[in-house]
Structures are given as structure tokens and as C-alpha cells.
Image (spheres, rainbow, N blue to C red):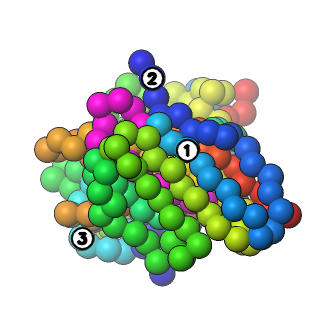
Amino acid sequence: DQQVKQNSPSLSVQEGRISILNCDYTNSMFDYFLWYKKYPAEGPTFLISISSIKDKNEDGRFTVFLNKSAKHLSLHIVPSQPGDSAVYFCAARAQGAQKLVFGQGTRLTINP
Amino acid sequence: DTGVSQNPRHKITKRGQNVTFRCDPISEHNRLYWYRQTLGQGPEFLTYFQNEAQLEKSRLLSDRFSAERPKGSFSTLEIQRTEQGDSAMYLCASSRDRAGVKTQYFGPGTRLLVL
């Protein structure tokens, strides 16, 4: 039962353009969402988060959008840089819970 | 600024052996989590501690797995009688127990290979 889904295993974007990573969830009890970035042989690094009371959160080149009615969130990276090449994980936390539920990840490749 | 540290970073063992991993959280964080990640998947929750109390365990944590946090600081995860299916990256994370703070910060992980 995959409660958080990232349906695109990989994405390739040209340097300087916008990268859009998508995530869908099924559990309506999720009220907090996070994006992590992971390089090979390292642990996930926190990027940005959003509470369910908001529909947008921005931090520098990173913006997360939340559409609660569609149970969908997306991460926008603009402009994309070569150092952004990594695997990106979407994670969600249910109200009152502590554990994070992760998607399968999307491998982003930024081409020069 | 010291992040979450994990030791060892890599462990190769033979099936049937016991292994123990250590996690040192960020110093002011009183919540500590263990996750497991297999190839092509996202991290999966195993267990979490608030201070020294283990408050939640996943069904993934079979009776061969045990985790401790005796003094509310570092934690250990032990796997007894390892099986090839235990091969994975074991990740530790920590967070503060403060209203509105929900971000978990991860360590570099311990990669286990069971032969």
C-alpha cells in the first residue's frame, strides 16, 4: 500500500530551465509534507517543507506547491543547476504521528 | 554545527551473524528515528524514540531487530541472525520536540551487505 507515490522514476532537464517534480498521496490524514534530496552514498538532505494549511512555500530557487483537493504536491526548482542532479524524495507525515512516509524517489539529471 | 553521525558507514557480514549500528543525533534533538532503505525505494520507518523511550515500532521490525537509546542520547540498532534480505541502507534521523517543528535530519547511513 503505497501512500506516497512519485510516478516519474527519472527526469532530465537542461541547465537553467525549470525542474518540476511531482508527488501524489492517498492518506487524507497527512498534514505536513517534505522534500529531501539524496546524493549517492549519503543520507537524505532536507530541502523544503509545507504544512497543509498552506498551498505554497518558497525558499530561494525551491518552491513547493500543495493541492489538497487533488492530493498532489510538486517541487519547482528554477533555475536548475548541475549540482541539483540527485534523487529527490517526497515525504509526508500524518497528524499526530511521528514517522515520515516516503515516495520511491525521482532521479533528476541536469544537463549542461 | 554537528549533524547526525552513524557508524560504521559500511558493514559486510555473513548470514547468521549479529551486527550493531550506532547513531549519534544532533545534540539538542530528543527525538531519534531509524529507517531502512532498499534499492529503488524510499526510506521506510522502523522505530522512533523520544528521549530514552521507544514509542513506536514498525511491523518491519521483526524480533531479530532491537533498538535502544539507553541515556536518551545515542542509539544502537542490532540485527541478530542476519539474513540476506536484511541487506539495505540503515538511516538514522533526529528532530527536536518542539511545537511546529517537524523536520527530521538524517545521518549518512550505514550500508549493510549480508553474504
Indicate left or right for B80 with B42 as reference: right
Q: Are marks 1 and 2 in contact (CB under 8 Å)?
A: no
Q: Which residue is mark 2?
A: B2
Type of amino acid under label 3: Met
Upstream in the sequence, badge 1 or badge 2? 2
Q: Residue at x 29, y 31 (%)?
A: B28
Question: Quadrant location of the N terminus of chain B?
Answer: top left
Say which mark, if any, is on residue A29: 3
Foreground mark, 1 or 3, reads 1
Q: Position of residue B51 (x, y in %)?
A: 28, 47
Q: Nearer the viewer, residue B26 or A52?
A: B26
Give the quadrant of residue A29: bottom left
Is residue B24 depicted above or below A102 in this figure? above
**Label 1, label 3: how far apart the Cα atoms are:** 32 Å
Density class for disc 1 (Cα within 10 Å; few <14, some 14-19, many ≥20) is: many
- Predominant SS of the magenta segment: loop
- The reply to whether the magenta stretch includes residue B36 is yes
User: Mark 1 and mark 3, same subunit?
Assistant: no
Type of amino acid under label 1: Arg
Q: Position of residue B12 (x, y in %)?
A: 80, 52
Q: Which residue is mark 1?
A: B22
Q: Nearer the viewer, residue A89 or B37?
A: B37
Indicate left or right for A49 with B62 as reference: left
Q: Position of residue A104 (x, y in %)?
A: 57, 62
User: Is disc 3 placed on a helix, strand or loop?
Assistant: loop
Q: Residue at x 55, y 68 (%)?
A: B65
